[in-house]
Amino acid sequence: MEGVEALKPEVRRKVRAALYWMREPMQMMREKFRSDTLRVYAGYWNAFECLVEAICLVVPQSKLTKQQKQDGITQFIADRQGNLDIAALGECYRSFVDPGFVAKASHALRVCCPERAEGYIVECFRIKPDQDRLYAIRNAINHGDIDSDSPQELARVEDKNDRLRMIVFGMLGRFLPFSCPLDPGPRQG
């Protein structure tokens, strides 16, 4: 793939890793002659994480200075009149000290999919109910919390896999020229 070869080495490594995670579960499906929905979903989530890293290498997140962090913390506390519970402390920490993967992924989505980024961020990290978040499904798969014997559960994951696949291909299009189908948006209902 000449498009991949033109990338900087550290970005090329991440894009190749994403392509691996997109391809590998499909190989296993062909070998077993059946669909392995959970493995495919996990593969696409791994590809998503690789592409987030690649995008952040190309367009790094802006970092807050020490003073901006301190001012943000001070304002955060003032906005709550000094009443901070455990959830607020966690939110403050993630906002100003260590934004973590959600902030990194949100940045990457805004860079590569500006017109759809906010909707993708909601689908990945904020949608209600919580168990329908793409990130929550990834966590449930990785921690063995998905009932792999339930046809309804597998259908739910398969539906979300379609959304995750659309996001991943949109991000991949940032690095490799190819014709990607238009995203019709999430299914309702």
Image: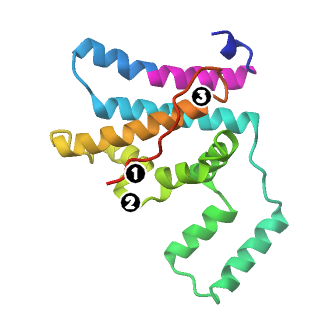
Asked if residue 64 lies in the magenta stretch, the reply is no
Q: Which residue is mark 2?
A: 130
Asked whether the beta carbons under mark 2 and mark 1 sit within 8 Å of each other, the answer is yes
Image coords of residue 94 (percent x, y)? 61, 62
- Judging depth in this view, the residue of 182 and 52 nearest the camera is 182
Horizontal side, residue 179 vs residue 29: left or right? right
Residue at image point 39% right, 34% down? 42
Circle 2 crowding by C-alpha within 10 Å: few under 14, some 14–19, many from 20: some
Percent position of residue 87, x then y? 50, 73
In the depicted structure, whether residue 155 falls above or below residue 98: above
Q: Amino acid at mark 3?
A: Leu
> Which residue, given by chain and number where applicable, does mark 3 sit on?
172
Q: Nearer the viewer, mark 2 or mark 3?
A: 3
Q: Amino acid at mark 1?
A: Ala
Residue 137 at x, y percent in the picture: 37, 47
Residue at (39% x, 36% y) in the render: 162
Q: Left or right? Give the position of 14 relative to 130.
A: right
Mark 1 lies on a secondary structure that is helix
Quarter of the image for the C terminus: give it.
Answer: bottom left
Helix, strand or loop at disc 2?
A: helix
